[in-house]
Image (cartoon, grey):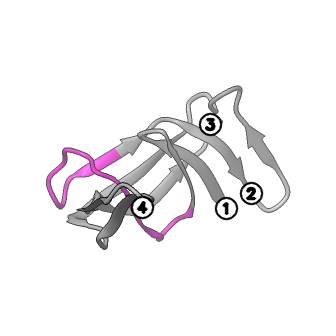
Amino acid sequence: MYAVFDVSGVQFTAQEGDVLKVPFQKAEPGTKLDIDKVLLIKNDDTALVGTPTVANAKIEAEVLGTGTHDRIIVYKYKRRTKYRRNAGHRQQYTEIKINKIVTPE
């Protein structure tokens, strides 16, 4: 069984037991996180597709920790004007483990 869900405007696909890096959430490591925006749940032979979300479905996850992604270099350049700008950025993330996918009954 797997599910497609939305966290902070980004969609993810996961099965039970997967570890994912999602956009930063204000949660302490070790706390439980319930995700209500489940867009699709796929079993072996059936699929529940939401309009836009599946009613009474949720994903129970556990927060493992937080961190920052690798540095992204932002370089701006305009020719013949001696215009060059160099900047870097590191996006924060929260690492979660999917414990259970709860389906509606």
> SS for tag 3?
loop
Does 83 sit above or below residue 73? above
Determine whether label 1 and label 2 are within 8 Å by CB. Answer: yes
Q: Nearer the viewer, residue 37 or 23?
A: 23
Q: Residues within 10 Å of mark 1 (few under 14, many from 20)?
A: few
Q: In the image, which residues are magenta?
A: 14-33
28 drawn magenta: yes
Crowd rating for badge 4 (residues with CA inside 10 Å; few <14, some 14–19, many 20+):
some
**Which residue is under mark 3?**
104
Where does residue 14 sit, x and y in percent of width and height?
56, 62
Answer left or right for 31 relative to 71.
Answer: left
As drawn, the label of residue 43 is 2
Residue 7: name its quadrant: top left
Q: What x and y, as percent, mark residue 82? A: 31, 60
Q: Going 48% across and 70% down the picture, which residue do you hit?
A: 18
Q: Earlier in the sequence, mark 2 or mark 3?
A: 2
Quarter of the image that includes the C terminus: top right
> What's the CA distance linking mark 4 and mark 3?
17 Å
* Residue type for callout 1: Met
Q: From what the image shows, is residue 23 above or below residue 36?
A: below
Q: Earlier in the sequence, mark 1 or mark 3?
A: 1
Query: Which residue does the image show at 31% across and 47% down from the upper left?
Result: 33
Report the side of 72 relative to 64 (left or right).
right
Q: CA distance from mark 1 to mark 2?
A: 5 Å
- Vertical side of 36 occupied by 32: above or below: below
Query: What type is the residue that disc 2 sits on?
Result: Asn
Front label number (1 vs 3): 1
Asked if the residues shown at circle 4 and circle 2 are in contact, with their CB atoms under 8 angstroms apart, the answer is no
